[in-house]
Structures are given as C-alpha cells and as structure tokens.
Image (spheres, rainbow, N blue to C red):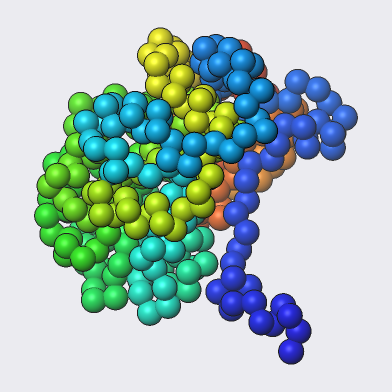
C-alpha cells in the first residue's frame, strides 16, 4: 500500500476548486498587457483609499503575530450587527468559515443540503469531511428566479442525517436571491438540531426591499449562522478575511476549531478601516448597478437569455457559442468565467467591471457576436 492509498478516500476523490484565471497568467501566456479579469467577482474599484493608507503605515507590524481574538475588529462588527462579541468568528476569508462549520458539524453518515448550482465550496467542504451532499433541484429556467434556490425542495430533503443546510443569498454563480418572508418560513420549519448557514457574501450589493439581513435573526434562531466577507464589495479578496455571526454557543465551537491566527495582522487592520468608509461602498454599489444594467441591456438587445442578478456578476447563456466566445475574449485580453462545472453549460459568468472595463467588454462582444 502506498502512502497515497492511505489518504482519506473522500480527499482523493475531491475535485479541486477551479479559480478564475489570474491576469498575470494570461498576459504571460499571450505576451499581452492590459488584460482585464471579470471572472472572480472582485471589486473593480479596488479597495478604499483609506485602507491603502492604513496598510502602508502598518508594514512595520508584519513581524508580530496578530491579535488572535481580533479585539478591535470584533468590537466594530458587534456594534454594526448589534450582537455580542462572542457571537463572532473571524475567518481567513469566509471560505474558511464554511470549512470550520463543516468540520464542526459534518462527518461520515451525516448530510449537508444545498441547491443545485449552489456555490461550489459547499460541495467541497462537505466531501472533505466525509459527509454526503444531498442536492436539491433548483428552480426552473422560466421561474422568476431562474436556476435559483428552491427552499421547498430543500426542506423536503431534510431527514435524520441532515446536519447542515447551506443557502447563498444571493447565490453565486446565479445571482438569484430569496426574500425575507420565504427565508423566515423556511427557518420555522427546519428542525432545531440542523444548522442553517446563510452565506451573505454579496449582501452590500443587494438593494431589493424584501432582501433580509439575517444577522438580525440570531435571537430567534439558535441554529442559524450568517457569513459575511470583506472580499467582495470591500475589495480585500487578496488579504483573506471574512466572519460568521451566530449564537455565542456556536461561536464558541467554531472558535475552538479555528486556527488561532487565521486573521492576519494586515487583514484585520484593513477590515477595520473598510467598515468606516461608507462613501467607497456607496460608490461601488453605484458602479455595479450601472454595469449590471448595461450588460443586461446588451444581452437583451442580442436576444441572449441571462439570469437576473442582484450581485456583482451576470450569468449569460451563450449556448454553443460559450466556448469559442470565452476563448476569443481571452485572446483579446478579457477573462470571464465558464460555469459548466456548476451544471450551467453554455453560460458565461461575467463580473461587473469599471465603466472602462465594461466598455471594452461590450466592444469585444459586439465584434464576436
Ligand atoms: C466569493 C464568495 C464567498 C467569499 O469567499 P471569501 O473566502 O470570503 O473570499 C463566499 N460565498 C460565496 C457564495 C461567494 O461567491
């Protein structure tokens, strides 16, 4: 028996996560410059200028371990969400939080429920723990939330093995969302021993009046965990920082599993400063709305089906042209994301860029279509 044979079978069977292609890699491969990446839902405006200042001043702190309890960041987050400090768990990105939840609640013989076309990390962390994925079919293409989460179908799958339910609101890569009323009804029917994770990675971008802030529901639901991130609207994806809001009891569990220094010293400072720059957030929302409208309008004009999105990306159905268009856009220095690995063959997910980036994208698409 080889050492590889002794690796856990669920780990050997894992499909590695396929990230968006880095800009430098494409530029290196094609010998071009000025490539743009619209493939990882990053903030095209960067991050707050105030964060850059703080980081420049903080370089001297790199030799020191960060505060393992993230005292100052947690103070700010506790105030923002009106929760106690012990209801917060800091993650190395919110993906880290998803992993902590899986390691705390999932193992062989237990099940996690999530939606078809749901964020891929749910499948990954579930399998890594040896648990079974119980995947609920999505809403149909002709519904008001095409390919979105079908909460009734998810509820139907709950059984005595169910330990965790993952819900992305809004979901990536569909950009679909569920209303506060629908989620409340759902929560009331989930057995109390089942953890429900509401992943709110794109929370700040959503302006729909019926869109819920589930961080306000923790008193009511001790089995609820809400996750947030600084990777998306705050533009700190490269620093890796996110967090969970839960009951203090669940927080205690997650914090035991967590590596003590998973929030690095620069990330903690950057997150703290980010929370204070409302202007940057407002500007990012505005840029996103403009870009979303332009791209959706363009798709409509061309008679292309797209999934209406409340997030910072739009998934468009190019059908059999998806492969060639993806390739040709790449040759023209524009990286977008095929999502066939989400069972959405023919779709390309395009992150909303800056005004200039969207102009370039639309010009190139116009030539290709
Ligand atoms: C991008 C994203 C995240 C955030 O990942 P980080 O680890 O915080 O960078 C979480 N959930 C969903 C659905 C996402 O699309």
Find the residue positioned furthest to the bottom.
1
* Residue at the (55%, 48%) spot, across then down: 339
Q: Residue at x 24, y 37 (%)?
A: 84
Residue 316: x %, y % from top left:
50, 37
Please identify the quarter of the rendering in which residue 308 is found. top left
**Relative to 298, is 309 on the left or the right?**
left
Q: Which of the image's four quarters has the C terminus?
A: top right
Q: Whole-percent x and y of residue 50?
A: 52, 12
Is 151 left or right of 266, judged from the image as shown? left
The picture places residue 168, in percent across and down from the top left corner, at 36, 46
* 345 lies above or below 161: above
Reply above or below: 28 against 107: above
Relative vertical location of residue 10 with respect to residue 126 in this rendering, above or below:
below
Residue 205 visible, this angle: yes
Q: Nearer the viewer, residue 63 or 157?
A: 63
User: What residue appears at the point 31 percent right and 59 percent down from the top-left corner?
Assistant: 165
Q: How many marks?
A: 0
Question: Percent from the top left, x then y, of residue 36?
Answer: 68, 25
Front residue of 75/239: it is 75
Split into 4 quadrants, where in the image is the N terminus? Answer: bottom right
| Direction from residue 290 to residue 363 in the image, left or right | right
In this rendering, does residue 294 appear at all? no
């Amino acid at each position: 028996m080889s050492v590889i044979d002794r690796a856990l079978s669920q780990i050997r069977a894992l499909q590695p996560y396929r990230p968006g292609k880095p800009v430098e890699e494409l530029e290196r491969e094609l010998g071009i410059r000025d490539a743009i990446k619209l493939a990882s839902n990053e903030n095209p405006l960067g991050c707050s200028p105030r964060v850059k200042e703080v980081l420049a001043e903080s370089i001297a702190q790199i030799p020191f371990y960060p505060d393992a309890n993230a005292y100052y960041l947690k103070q700010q987050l506790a105030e923002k969400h009106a929760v106690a400090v012990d209801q917060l768990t800091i993650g190395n990105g919110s993906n880290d939080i998803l992993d902590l939840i899986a390691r705390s609640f999932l193992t062989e013989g237990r099940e996690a429920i999530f939606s078809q076309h749901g964020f891929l990390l749910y499948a990954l962390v579930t399998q890594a723990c040896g648990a079974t994925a119980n995947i609920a079919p999505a809403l149909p293409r002709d519904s008001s939330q095409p390919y979105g989460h079908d909460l009734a179908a998810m509820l139907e799958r709950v059984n005595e093995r169910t330990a965790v339910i993952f819900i992305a609101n809004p979901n990536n890569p569909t950009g679909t969302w569920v209303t506060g009323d629908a989620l409340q009804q759902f929560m009331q029917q989930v057995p109390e021993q089942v953890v429900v994770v509401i992943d709110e990675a794109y929370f700040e971008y959503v302006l729909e009046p019926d869109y819920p802030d589930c961080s306000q529901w923790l008193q009511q639901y001790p089995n609820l965990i809400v996750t947030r991130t600084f990777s998306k609207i705050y533009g700190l994806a490269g620093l890796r920082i996110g967090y969970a809001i839960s009951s203090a009891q669940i927080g205690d569990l997650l914090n035991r599993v967590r590596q003590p220094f998973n929030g690095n010293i620069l990330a903690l400072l950057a997150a703290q400063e980010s929370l204070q720059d409302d202007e940057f957030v407002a500007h990012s929302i505005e840029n996103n709305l403009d870009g979303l409208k332009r791209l959706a309008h363009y798709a409509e004009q061309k008679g292309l089906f797209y999934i209406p999105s409340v997030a910072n990306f739009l998934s468009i159905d190019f059908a059999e042209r998806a492969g060639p268009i993806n390739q040709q856009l790449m040759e023209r220095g524009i990286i977008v994301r095929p999502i066939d690995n989400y069972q959405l063959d023919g779709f390309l997910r395009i992150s909303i860029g800056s005004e200039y980036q969207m102009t370039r994208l639309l010009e190139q698409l116009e030539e290709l279509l």
